[in-house]
Amino acid sequence: MTAPATDDHRFVISLGCRDQTGIVARISAFLTEVGGWIVEAAYHADADSGWFFTRQAVRASSVSMSVDELRAKFAEVAAELGPDTEWSLHDTREPKRVVLLVSKEGHCLHDLLGRAAGGELPAEICAVIGNHPDLGDVTRRHGIDFHHVPFSKDPAERGPSFDRVRELVDAHNPDAVVLARFMQVLPAELCEHWAGRAINIHHSFLPSFVGARPYHQAFTRGVKLIGATCHYVTAELDAGPIIEQDVIRVDHADAVADMVRQGRDIEKLVLSRGLRWHLEDRVLVHGRKTVVFS
Amino acid sequence: MTAPATDDHRFVISLGCRDQTGIVARISAFLTEVGGWIVEAAYHADADSGWFFTRQAVRASSVSMSVDELRAKFAEVAAELGPDTEWSLHDTREPKRVVLLVSKEGHCLHDLLGRAAGGELPAEICAVIGNHPDLGDVTRRHGIDFHHVPFSKDPAERGPSFDRVRELVDAHNPDAVVLARFMQVLPAELCEHWAGRAINIHHSFLPSFVGARPYHQAFTRGVKLIGATCHYVTAELDAGPIIEQDVIRVDHADAVADMVRQGRDIEKLVLSRGLRWHLEDRVLVHGRKTVVFS
Amino acid sequence: MTAPATDDHRFVISLGCRDQTGIVARISAFLTEVGGWIVEAAYHADADSGWFFTRQAVRASSVSMSVDELRAKFAEVAAELGPDTEWSLHDTREPKRVVLLVSKEGHCLHDLLGRAAGGELPAEICAVIGNHPDLGDVTRRHGIDFHHVPFSKDPAERGPSFDRVRELVDAHNPDAVVLARFMQVLPAELCEHWAGRAINIHHSFLPSFVGARPYHQAFTRGVKLIGATCHYVTAELDAGPIIEQDVIRVDHADAVADMVRQGRDIEKLVLSRGLRWHLEDRVLVHGRKTVVFS
Amino acid sequence: MTAPATDDHRFVISLGCRDQTGIVARISAFLTEVGGWIVEAAYHADADSGWFFTRQAVRASSVSMSVDELRAKFAEVAAELGPDTEWSLHDTREPKRVVLLVSKEGHCLHDLLGRAAGGELPAEICAVIGNHPDLGDVTRRHGIDFHHVPFSKDPAERGPSFDRVRELVDAHNPDAVVLARFMQVLPAELCEHWAGRAINIHHSFLPSFVGARPYHQAFTRGVKLIGATCHYVTAELDAGPIIEQDVIRVDHADAVADMVRQGRDIEKLVLSRGLRWHLEDRVLVHGRKTVVFS
């Protein structure tokens, strides 16, 4: 009854609905009916919001129908669970696509390119867009397109640049638009347009030190830990649903430059974890918060 | 549909069985049938051993029958899942009982007594047994019986002492026998007798530094982190299934005495977490390993 | 040349002065002159403020004079380093004194009492003062005086209560006044009066979640780590110099009550570490920040 | 009195000698004499071995002589401290050199190349040598020489390969020879030849899980944390002086492949930290242990 080790082809269901008795029974009965061998299952009922969340991964080889048929059938189950049920059903053989937005600081880009090269990222990096040209060479060396879109110093004149970025990004219809230290605040309409797909790495332990120069803020306040936060981008600056956070210890001997250097390691880790979970459909958003089935 | 906040009365099912299709469906169908409102559900299928584990907590108030009736009915479900299925069904209103074995070092005892006094421990501490009398006063100040059972310096002559400890412990039929820095190696027959209930805190990050004086071993080796391990006691010394571990950073400036002092904080944390999970039926043992639905 | 292991009698010098060439040379020449065997030495030059900090511990037995003579002689060295030099010279055989302020939540009190009972706290707990009587019994069981000082519900009428607390505290002339989850905001004049001695434990990773109910704030924001902060009390709420901070991981499954429970462990650790460092003269304050020679 | 922010040119003294009264005074008097502005100073007296360690960094611009003159003068001071005194004096403008040994797993290589590209590594990567050709392309893309040295499957016939590696490495006279997941056990004579310069990253929290396939060992044992260890290479396998270690939490749901993936992040962090400290002369070795002035 043990599947071959190489059989890592999965159908992944993520679902959120109003909490009620019998949800697990309904979904698991359906999966049993179609022969689905569950290899991962996670549930969460949020008492506060009255919302229920689940993620289930089944062996594709155990299911007696195509993914499209499965989607059609599961739609009926989802409908039974209420009109505001939100769900997705992903076939892990359908590759996911990512576009990265960068500026001058390359550590997050290097990290993601290295992970992609090592086969560790469950997605293809389709393109990298920079508001500065600095990271073009390293991107192209990995055989990935780099687009330089200059931005005006005057915030009021950045509209055309954002239009160009939008056009370049949307050409790939990506599953994730990653602001890998992009350093530009997205206009509200782009936040809305990429809602649930735009992911930012902020170099502080939010909600502390929102906005610019968080390591300087941390230094001035004399905190004993610095951190990084991976979150979905929303119109309110640095206030979107948090996917992942982590911290590292600093002390009085650490100048701002030391914090910047040590913080990079945390930024890379937190962004790569958050992005992986997003791409594997492990992150379910509800209101201002996330459920992460890591 | 929201239960009152004070309704924390639960029926908790823990189950391990051979992995197969339909387990979740079978259990959740049963729970739906008896009206069970699931507030926590966790699953794990271990590909390595082909074993399946689950823990489910339902609101007692949502179930239409007594806990004894529920147990009788669930026994049928469990039987369907195979003859070697192991399960328990616990009513959180049935209080759990703990007996502590101690020696001279009091930090773990103080910590557990403080937690009990603060209502944080999901169990009653029935008695404390020490091979030295040192911790008698603090125990009695908390209104708990303390038994001093002297041990011979000669390991060959400790049999009667262990017999006396066994007698004192078994009088309470405890859900957990906690070796809270007891410093005596249990004989194999006692390990067998209390199998799955005897819990030890070892003051190293196992499997490093098995046996005596682990902080001295750690100092000599020059490790940069020291740790503690909470594990079930088995006949093989410090080799039982691990429930919880944690570490703390040390450096060259830390002498053995500093490691001992800092290590105490980790020992307390790791033991209290491991014990809590054990008492809440979150720890399922299979072979040499544990599944912890924390 | 190795001193006996039991010789832990120290003279500890802490000093802060304007940074300049030759400070280390001046102090170490002085210590060599009086025969001082340095067992710990730490230095920090803060480039930002131009201030220099040092802490040195010497074996008392190696010094050829009494602590009072040593103080008199060292005062001349300190004077050479500038008129705004701040320093202390502590004899570790002169016991330090602590007074604790508490409310109803007992975990920090239990923890400190347990540490004191185990000989782990480098100070005597002289008295505990509570604005509620709840923690009187446990305090007295440890043979320590407990004073209940009721506080009016009306903040405007709390003056007499604070006067009484001040009187009770000052009777012991303590080295540390610890707000061990005291839940009352000290008036500015008390902050000033106990400046550098009043230590608070705040149950968040400051500067996030200042003020009341930080775990509720953390839950609402959906952070992935919760923390605690030990800091000196100043007139600005939760904004005093930070001594120590730490965090623990939480996730979507943790309700506020879970955060409260898990947070207690971090509060205890952070407070006990911060208090220990304060009592061992390891914390030097400059402006809004601390240097901690841990 | 504040030096310009860009003045990061330093002379760094590292010294170990028999502990005695007056060492700090002697060294600091010397530094004062030559005008040295100390920007970092760390000391450690090891009571166990009776050995004293220090590292001091002074602003090069503050010293009134060349680095060679300074070395000549300091040699006299060191000689006064005893015949077995070990010391070095490094000018941070003299670039350090690193050679990397790799196999097929590229994550540590990618990480170090990314850090070098970002200007974060205080050294030049002179060459990369692989016993497989797999990582040649990524290395050359960064403009760095890659040498493929095939190794026989028969351990007895690997001598010529090791000779070739030695020749290639020694051509650069590197300050560090980094085994970045090299997967070949160095012969004793190479360990001796590169003593204090050969640095390995082992993918476990040593001394647990020495040797091959440590993640498999960790999985089998059921540990709750996995780790990595950066250490100097000695003839005894995985037993050299430890420079840095760190761990990450795993649980029952993590298969070996998950541990491998998560472990990579810890390996990268631990190796990059350990290597940085080595290159900045922050690591002093004494016997089987290190002092790390991080």
Image (tube, coloured by chain):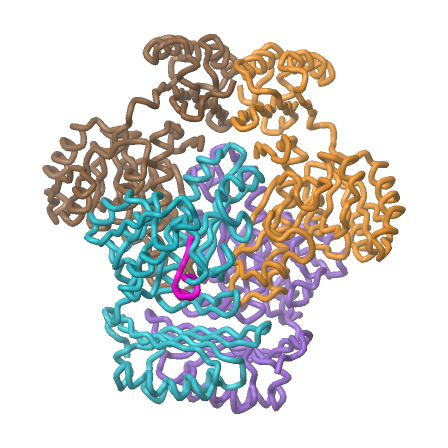
Chain colours: A purple, B cyan, C brown, D orange
Q: Quadrant of residue C258?
A: bottom left
With respect to residue B290, does C33 lie above or below? Answer: above
Q: Could you say which is closer to the camera, residue A293 or residue C116? A: C116
Query: Residue, x 73% and y 41% (percent of image)?
Result: D235
Q: Is residue D12 toward the left or the right of residue C279 in the image?
A: right
* Residue A32 placement (x, y as % from top left): 52, 88
Q: Quadrant of residue D64?
A: top right
> Can residue A243 be seen at all in this image of the molecule?
yes
The image quadrant where one finds the C terminus of chain D is top right
Q: Is residue C261 toward the left or the right of residue C142 in the image?
A: right
Q: Could you say which is closer to the camera, residue B187 or residue C210? A: B187
> Can residue A235 be seen at all in this image of the molecule?
no
Q: Which residues are magenta?
A: B190-201
* Residue C238 placement (x, y as % from top left): 31, 42
Q: Is residue A288 toward the left or the right of residue B4 in the image?
A: right
Q: Is residue B193 magenta?
A: yes
With respect to residue B222, does C219 lie above or below? Answer: below
* Residue A118 placement (x, y as % from top left): 71, 60
With respect to residue A175, does C45 lie above or below? Answer: above
* Residue B176 placement (x, y as % from top left): 35, 62
Q: Quadrant of residue A111?
A: bottom right
Q: How many marks?
A: 0
Q: Residue furthest front?
A: B157
